[in-house]
Every structure is written in C-alpha cells, then in structure tokens.
Amino acid sequence: MYFIRTVTVAPRLPEKISRLDELARNLWFSWNPRAQELFRRINSSLWEEVKHNPVCFLLNVSQEQLEKVAKSESYLLLYSQVMEELDRYLSAPTWFSHHYPGHEHHVIAYFSAEFGIHESHPTYSGGLGLLAGDHCKSASDLGLPFVGVGLLYKSGYFTQRINREGWQEAHYPRLNFYQMPITPVTNPDGSPLYVPVELPGRTVYLKIWRVRVGRVQVYLLDADVTANNMADRALTGQLYGGDRETRICQEILLGIGGVRVLRALGIHPLAWHINEGHAAFLLVERIRELVQAGVPVKAAVEAVRAGTLFTTHTPVPAGHDVFSAEMIDKYFSHLYNQLGMTREDFLALGWDEEQKVFNMTLLALRLSSYCNGVSRLHGQVTRRMFRRFYPGIPMEEIPISSITNGVHINSWLAPELQELFDRYLEDGWRQNCCHRQTWERVSAIPSEELWEVHCRLKAKMVRIARDNLRGQRLRNQEPALRVREVEQYLDPGILTIGFARRFATYKRANLLLRDKERLARLVTHPQHPVQFIFAGKAHPADRLGQELIKQIYELTNQEPFKGRVVLLEDYDIALARSLLQGVDVWLNTPRRPLEASGTSGQKAALNGVIHCSVLDGWWPEAYDGENGFAVGEAREYHDDETQDRDDAHSLFALLEETIIPMYYDRDQKGIPRAWIELMKRSLQTIPPFFNTERMVKEYCQQYYVPAMERNLHLSRNGCERARHLASFKERLRENWSLVHIESVKAGETRALGVGEPLPVEAVVWLGPLTPEEVMVEIVYGRVDDKCPESFEHMPGAFCLIDSHSNGQLSNINRTPMTVAEQTSTGAYLYRGNLILPQGTIGFTVRVRPASDGFAHIFELPLVAWAPQF
C-alpha cells in the first residue's frame, strides 16, 4: 500500500487583475452582472461549463487566456470599474447605520438549515434555502450587522436525473469545497478551527467554513473531518437525508454547534433569528451557557427568550420536526444537570401532550419573544394550527404575526431588463426599489421594446430547455432520432406556461392532467396553441411526489403532447432563473391554504412574466384583478377532491376564455398590446412590495432592533431584570386560578350613537395579585357568525343589538379600565368607557397579566373572561 498526496496547481493571476480571486470568493458577484462579465469575457464556454462558479473557473482557465485579458484595455477598464464598485459597496454608509447608529455593532445571528445563494454553492433544496439566501443578500445591501449559520453538506441536496422510464434518480456528488466560493476558518496560527459538540458516547468536531455574501458572513459547519468516526462524518453528508437519528444529530450540530462556533469566533449576537425549527436547539445551548454562568434557569429562559425571533414556514402539522421522549433522553440527558432542569422540565420546553412528542416548532415558539409566519394568510393558518397551546386567547391575539416574504431584485432580474430599466426608470432605481413611484415609470417603456426584450429572454430560455432535454436523452442512450427531435420542441412564438417547484403533492403539478382531452385541445389549437414546461425535484423519500414526475414524463411522450409539454431535470437556481425570466405565464396551483408564501411568482413578475395562481401564500396580498390571474376562489373546502375539481375547472376556463385570447390578440405589428399592459401593471404593483429589501427592513423594525434592546434590558447586571421577570411570571402562574370577574354592568345601549361613550363597570377578584400586575379591559369587535378569527372563548359577549349574542368577534379592539375603588370584600371595582363604532358590536371584559417587560400582551398566555352578563 502507498499513499499519494495531491496538490492543485492553478494559473497565476497577472498583477493587473490580481483581485479576481477576491471577487470570486465574495458572492456579491452573483447579483452583479458586470462582475460576472469579468469571468465570462475570459472564456465564456468554460464559465458555462463550471456553472458560473468563479473559484472553479480560475482553477481551470488557462494562463494564456488570463495574460491576454490582462493586456486588453477594455477588459482592464471593466475590471477597474467593478472593483471600485465592490470597494464602494463594502465601505459606504448604509441604511442600517443611518437608521440605527447605536446598534451597528450589535450582531444579528440568522440560523437556517439551508442557504440558497447561488448555483455555485449547491447546499439548498428549495424555497426555504432561497429565501435564506435572498435574506442574507438584502441584509448585506442594507448594512445589517448580520451573520448566517448553517451546515455544509458534502453532497448538497441531490442531483436529479430522469431515467428512460420517467423515474427520478437521486445522485449525490461529493462537492469539492476548495473549488467553491467558500474559505475554511482558521486559528491565529493558521491551523483549522474545530469546534466540539457532544453526542451520546462521543464528541463530534466541526470544521468551519466562511461564505462572504457582500458585507455578510455566513458560517457553515462541516463534520466531515478525520477526527470523527465515519458515521459522524456523514452527518453533514446530505441535506434532509437519513433517518430520525440523523435528523436530530444534524439539528444538534446546527443549533448547539452553531452557538459554539459563534462564541469561538468572538461573535456575541444580541438578536437570534431561527429560520424554521431545525435550529431551535440553539435555545438550549444559550440557556446552558447562562446557567453555567450562575444565572437561575428560569431567569436564563427569560434572557434567552428576550432576543429570539422564530420564523415558521410550514403550514401543515406533518412538516414540523418531532422526536420521541426516549430520543430526547438519549441525546440530552447529559445536559439536564448543566441546565439546572429535571427531565420533565426539559421535555416541557417542546412537549406536545396531545401527540406525545417533542416538537421543535413548539420549542422555538415557547422560547422566542417574537414569532412570525411568512405571509398574511400563513400567519392566520399558523395561529389556527397552534391555538390549542393558547387556551382562552382569541386566535387573532395569539402571539404569532407575519412578514410576507420577498425576493432579492438584483439576483433575479434579467440583465437585459436591468439595461432597459436603466434607460427608462429614474437614476438610482435599484436603491429605491421599495418605492411605488420608482416602478410607475414602467409605463414610459415603449411596448415594442419591452416585448422585444421578453422575446429575447424567451428564445434564450427555449435554447436552455432544449439543451436540458438533449442532455437527458443522450445520457439515457436514447435513439438518435429521439435526441434530434428535441430541436423542434418549444416554439418561441407560442404561449408558454411554466410550472417549476418542489414536486410535493400539495402543489398539484398534475392539476391540468385531470382533463387530458381539454389539455390536448389547448396544445393542438391550430391558431392559438399553448405549451407547458415542468421542472422540479421530489424528495427522495417522497414516493408520491416521484410518481407525479413520472406521470408528467409519460404525458410528454404521448401524442399530441410531445414537444408541447416538456419536463426538465435537475431544477436549480440557474435553471429557475432562465425559466422565471423566459416563460409567458408562471403557474402556481397549491392546495389552498398549504402554501406558506412561495416566492417564485414574485421572481417571475419581476421579469414581466404574468403570475397565474391559486389565491394562496403571498398572492392574496398582491392580486388586484389587473396584475395577473387568480385560479379558483379564496374559500375553504372540506375535501381535497372537490377543491381539485373546482380549481382544475377554474384554471381551464381562465386559460380558454381569458389568458389565451389576450396573449394572441395582436396588432398589425404583431404586438400583443393588452398583454403588454398587463405585464406593465404587474411590474408596477408587485416588485415595489414583494422584495427582500422591504422584508428585511420590516424584520429590523418589528423584530431585530426590539430584540436587541430587550436582550440588553434583561441581561444587564447578571440578568437582574430577567430574574425579576421570571419571578413575576411565576407569581402570576401560581395565583391566576384565584383571578375572576364577578360581575359586569353596562349602561343603556338603545339610544347611543356612533362615537358616544358606553359606561362599563366590572367587579374583579385578584386574590393576592395587585392592580399593577394585571390589565382589566373592555374587549370589543364586530359580530360575525362566520369570522374565521373566532372569539369563541368569550363566554358572555354582549351584543349591542341582540343581547347575549352567540356571534364571534373580528378585528378585536381593547379599551383599558381603571380601578375606582376596592370593595369591603376585597374585590376591585373597575370602570371604563367604550366608545362605540358603527355596526353590530359585541363586547366583554377580561383580565390578563400586564408588564412593561412583555414583548406581547399574551407573552404569558393567561386570561380571565367575564361571565354571562
């Protein structure tokens, strides 16, 4: 046996272009077309071959080609301009420094199981990762003191291949991290930095890699090091691979290991953002740190909660990670003493008594001051999903809010359209992308020019799609005739509809296949035909999703669908970019309300592609009747079959009666004027709001900065205020059973008009609690027997028209009451005035805990309602 040591010999960068290596290792290049052009100009075919990976490109480009461009004046001019732009970007004052100068050095840590930043860094699976990548990019653009933490997967998610039978095959290539735009983190002496994490019976060591995303640093954890055994080295092998044991180990490495990595790097965040429940164990590690430093465990919990935000993306219970009590014991029993907790105390952090499992989402919810869904509708769905954990609290007031997702405009907007916008929008439009007036100037773009750019992007997309299909057939060793016929597929002059996303069953990729005869009439229409492009991966363990892929594949090989319905393989960021920029219509058909947000349609709309979607996720907030198309109704169904049938019928009718006629309605020049007006309306209304600049600003204003300030407030002087808050909550919990409202009296309502006060009195028993520790308030809202945000916990709602109405309240409002006196029996008399709005109003009185230290009025979910009155 003998050993071979390998060494990589790369060409030497000429002095005049020596900073290309620096540029290659900062993913800022990925949203700067001129920076990408620097590499493309050296060798365009190699640039495509390495999938736009500049580090791999510089390892493989020839020395002669580098020397040649280093002597080109035009190239050196572009190089100088790009490097000046990068330097200016990294050093200029930012939005965050201007608005929050006192927090410039207070770090925000963003934990996510995946980061989809660019195709050269394939450690993502879908929307969650792409959202994380765009979040980091906008955090960089806005100058947030922001770091990301994730895992580095040796095989990424997987490479998808479609075989000759139409089955998805998952391949797991071993990524060479040294040929990617990432860098290992080292100790001061140059040796690799390793961070230990304890698992049952052994210690796993993590190597740390740094990804530069503009101003932002993302740290990725890698267990594939020789100090670990082979099983542990595989823990960071695949994204979402393995069994439950693998999953809990990965989540321990991400959460606990991630905190330890930041500490090892000297980074001490004040705000901690958990992007989905995978990283929630970071809460456990932060509690352990404080307890080991001498902070009582209950105070430690309050201090940790103070600076934590949790974002959930999953609108179905099955999508939340859960573990058995036995598995939690196996992996955490060694920490119970270090945490100052009993086994029961620890399990209670995430225990779902109904399901008898430890739920990672519950762990995050219970230990975060702030929680949000990712669209307005998803916020409602999430409150409904978790309402059983907030007994007695109106669903509208459950402490789960929402910030609607967006997309990073510079990453997804086609360079061709950027050039067009440079000519017709105001200077600085990229820096003012959140302003509606910025996009109003789209109306000034000549229709012919906008259409010409769209047609160029469409032709480019068709070439890429044909190449994808040709590659499939060549690899599958199909006959030469089958390979050649691909050249006739996808006519650029035909209305083209794209459907590309994860092949999860609820996304209903096969909705159009419910009526194949009707679909056949669409694709074969002699004057107005339609063609469809499908792409997407199914999870390797999702057999039903893989069957959907096979079903569509088989359709593509049948007459009359051949060449008019195609299925592309290995959907990734690069392919997504091409499709989103090149199709005419972007189709989205999830089973409402199971789409948390979805952002692909936002990316498509940014490129003038018309969005056609079920009213789910972000689309109900964007659709105005004139900027796209809505499939079906915004209603609830009691069975999937009925919903699928209705939505399929709605989609076919929409295509036949509206979309197809509008697209083919051309003037004498062949220009579809009405269609282009629709494109312009979409561009004017969707990009100004549905972008990550707006989104990240909202996170700053609503969560990050308040979390920083709350963390500072509760952590000072050895967590002194956290100790007081913990003590206060304990006192309330112990005595709340004694709190009740004995009676409520209201004045005469019949003669009252809008805006007039209605006097209300309540006699309240507080037991040993004091009026300063509670809030007694009148709660009122409109009565609605069908309101989904029900107020069903209010047993004695008094309706101003129908006394003792059983209706429900929506749009809940609160009016505080004040203590008038303490009665001889020890109860308190409260008085207040309800100022009446117009309409049928229901109201009642309640008592709830109150503290300036609360992040939300129901941070401590206790409430006492008035009896019938």
Image (cartoon, rainbow, N blue to C red):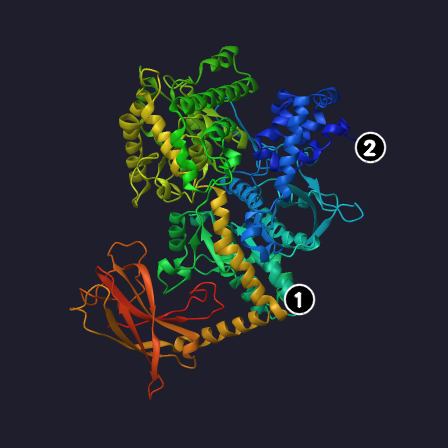
Can residue 459 be seen here? The reply is yes
**Of label 1 and label 2, which has the lower sequence position?**
2
> Which residue type carries mark 1?
Gln
At x 43%, y 59%, the residue is 399
Label ID, residue 3 = 2
Mark 1 or mark 2, which is nearer to you? Answer: 1
Considering every residue shown, the one lying at the far left of the view is 751
Q: Quadrant of residue 629?
A: top left
Instruction: Return the residue at label 1.
Output: 292
At x 45%, y 56%, the residue is 355
Q: Position of residue 7 (x, y in %)?
A: 79, 31
Q: Is residue 648 left or right of residue 113?
A: left
Badge 2 crowding class, 10 Å Cα cut-off, few under 14, some 14 to 19, many 20 or more, is few
Q: Quadrant of residue 759?
A: bottom left
Considering every residue shown, the one lying at the far top of the view is 481
| Total marks placed | 2
- Between 816 and 570, the one lying in front of the other is 816
Q: Position of residue 364 (x, y in %)?
A: 51, 56
Q: Is residue 578 left or right of residue 225?
A: left
Q: Position of residue 420 (x, y in %)?
A: 47, 27
Considering every residue shown, the one lying at the far front of the view is 427
At x 16%, y 69%, the residue is 751
User: Quarter holding the N terminus?
Assistant: top right
Badge 1 crowding class, 10 Å Cα cut-off, few under 14, some 14 to 19, many 20 or more, is some
User: Quarter holding the C terminus?
Assistant: bottom left
Q: Is residue 27 left or right of residue 381?
A: right
Under circle 2, the secondary element is: loop
Q: CA distance from mark 1 to mark 2?
A: 46 Å
